[in-house]
Amino acid sequence: MLRVSSVCMKRVMISVVRSTAVRHQSVPSLGDELMKTSTRPRRRRNKALTPAAAPQLSDDEWKTVAIKYVSDIGAAFAEASAMNKGSIENDGQGNVSIFLGEGRGYFSMSLNATSRTIDLISPFSGILQYVHYPDTNSWLHTKDHHDIKGLLVRDFLRVGCVGLPKI
């Protein structure tokens, strides 16, 4: 018959208790300590952008910035559009149409003063809205935060145009 001393049995019980405690995370791990001392901020998903969430300009400032931005984009597409037998129409009031050539469609950008957005119609992506951010001087999509210039170039190439606009 095998006899186990009470001292030996206590050692076995202590080791079982310790291993269970480690398994159930009651003892802090090295990773927990690193997380406490980390100075890097945690990344969070951005909420959908709305004009109210964006830093605000006065109505006149917003309109001036928007008209200049849309006109600059139209001018940047002028040479590339001509290479594809297209044309540019700019009324000077914030409405720009970029015709991409026969059978390829057009981009249309117009200002929406009520929602303070640029409304873009793309032959590939459809209707999109962009909000202005003065701190970076960029126009970002209201839902997924992509820049308007990137989408214009991407769709320009997707519809079969050649060349690149000078954005």
Image (tube, helix red, strand yellow):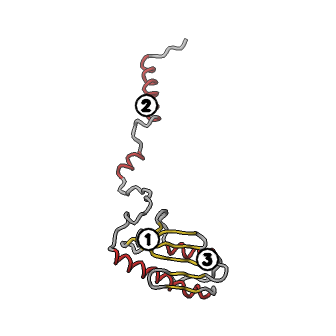
Residue, disc 2:
18
Three-letter residue code for mark 2 = Arg
Residue ID at (58%, 69%): 125
| Residue 120 at x, y percent in the picture | 51, 73
Q: Secondary structure at mark 3?
A: helix
| Residue 7 at x, y percent in the picture | 42, 19
Q: Nearer the viewer, mark 2 or mark 1?
A: 1
Residue, disc 1:
117
Mark 2 in CB contact with mark 1 (< 8 angstroms):
no
Three-letter residue code for mark 1 = Thr
Circle 1 residues within 10 Å: few <14, some 14–19, many ≥20: many
* Of the pair 42 and 141, the residue shown nearer to us: 141
* Of the pair 150 and 108, the residue shown nearer to us: 108
Q: Secondary structure at mark 1?
A: strand
Vertical placement of residue 138 versus 38, above or below? below
Q: Secondary structure at mark 2?
A: helix
| Disc nearer the start of the sequence (2/3) | 2
Q: CA distance from mark 2 to mark 1?
A: 61 Å
Q: Quadrant of the N terminus?
A: top right
| Disc nearer the start of the sequence (2/1) | 2
Mark 2 in CB contact with mark 3 (< 8 angstroms):
no
Vertical placement of residue 69 versus 142, above or below? below
| Disc nearer the start of the sequence (3/1) | 1
Q: Nearer the viewer, mark 3 or mark 1?
A: 1
Residue, disc 3:
157
* Of the pair 108 and 145, the residue shown nearer to us: 108
Mark 3 in CB contact with mark 1 (< 8 angstroms):
no
Circle 3 residues within 10 Å: few <14, some 14–19, many ≥20: few
Q: CA distance from mark 2 to mark 3?
A: 63 Å
